[in-house]
Image (cartoon, helix red, strand yellow):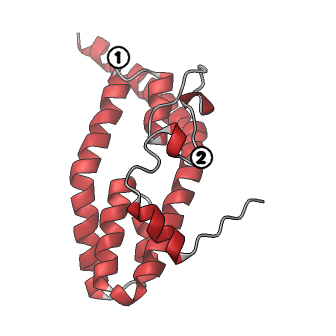
């Protein structure tokens, strides 16, 4: 077990050092790109697990890769705004516990989590630290479990359904010709 304790003075000194962790010689911990590999033993570069799965399985130039990048871009641009607005609005209705809303913030991408949890922190400033902790924990759990759900359940079921529906769609086209 590794335990690192940083007191407030240490944290402030770290914040003041703008050149910290910009190169391997001024970093305490450094990872090379070969630390994480994809299924083909290539260095993994995707930040989002689902993009990594699709790029590894189909490639980003495939229809699947283009589709997931479209979803990622639209989600990052519009999903972030939607998450922030909805979180603030639902928090103002006072129908759900604010901690539950913070946990809901964790299901999005990093930008969505930041926007959503910031809106909640502004709605309830007294619980800011607790809300950010719940949102961060939820995001961590979502990434940890979501990767495996996507890899072992969602993608195989989607491929199976696509194969089934594609076959019946070709039959319909053939019958109409």
Q: If the image is split into quadrants, where does the C terminus sit?
A: top left
Write the residue at 56% across / 32% down. 32
Write the residue at 30% across / 11% down. 174
The answer to whether any part of residue 135 appears in the image is no
The answer to whether any part of residue 73 appears in the image is yes
Q: Is residue 115 above or below residue 174?
A: below
The residue at which mark 2 appears reads as 29
- Is there a contact, CB below 8 Å, between mark 2 and mark 1? no
Q: Secondary structure at mark 2?
A: loop
Write the residue at 56% across / 59% down. 141
Which mark's residue is nearer the viewer, 2 or 1?
A: 2
Q: Position of residue 10 (x, y in %)?
A: 53, 69
Q: Residues within 10 Å of mark 1 (few under 14, many from 20)?
A: few
Q: Secondary structure at mark 1?
A: helix
Q: Is residue 174 above or below residue 44?
A: above
Q: If the image is split into quadrants, where does the N terminus sit?
A: bottom right
Q: Residues within 10 Å of mark 2 (few under 14, many from 20)?
A: few
Residue ranking furthest to the right:
1
Q: Nearer the viewer, residue 155 or 117?
A: 117
Q: Position of residue 11 (x, y in %)?
A: 49, 69
- Say which quarter of the image contains residue 104: bottom left
Q: Is residue 31 above or below residue 9?
A: above
- Say which quarter of the image contains residue 105: bottom left
- Residue 137's disc is none
The residue at which mark 1 appears reads as 170
As measured in the structure, the alpha-carbon distance from the residue carrying label 2 to the one carrying label 1 is 54 Å
| Left or right: 104, with 38 as reference point | left
Write the residue at 23% across / 62% down. 82
| Left or right: 125, with 2 as reference point | left
């Amino acid at each position: 077990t590794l335990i690192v304790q940083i007191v407030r003075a240490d944290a402030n000194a770290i914040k003041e050092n703008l050149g910290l962790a910009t190169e391997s010689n001024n970093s305490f911990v450094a990872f090379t790109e070969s630390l994480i590999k994809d299924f083909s033993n290539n260095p993994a570069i995707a930040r989002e697990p689902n993009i990594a799965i699709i790029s590894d399985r189909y490639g980003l130039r495939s229809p699947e890769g283009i589709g997931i990048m479209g979803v990622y871009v639209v989600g990052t641009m519009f999903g972030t705004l939607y998450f922030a607005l909805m979180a603030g609005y639902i928090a103002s209705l006072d129908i759900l516990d604010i901690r539950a809303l913070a946990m809901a913030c964790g299901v999005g991408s990093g930008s969505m989590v930041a926007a959503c949890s910031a809106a909640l922190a502004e709605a309830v400033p007294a619980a800011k630290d607790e809300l950010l902790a719940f949102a961060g924990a939820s995001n961590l759990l979502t990434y940890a479990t979501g990767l495996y759900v996507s890899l072992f359940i969602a993608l195989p079921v989607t491929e199976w359904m696509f194969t089934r529906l594609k076959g019946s769609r070709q039959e319909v086209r053939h019958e109409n010709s």
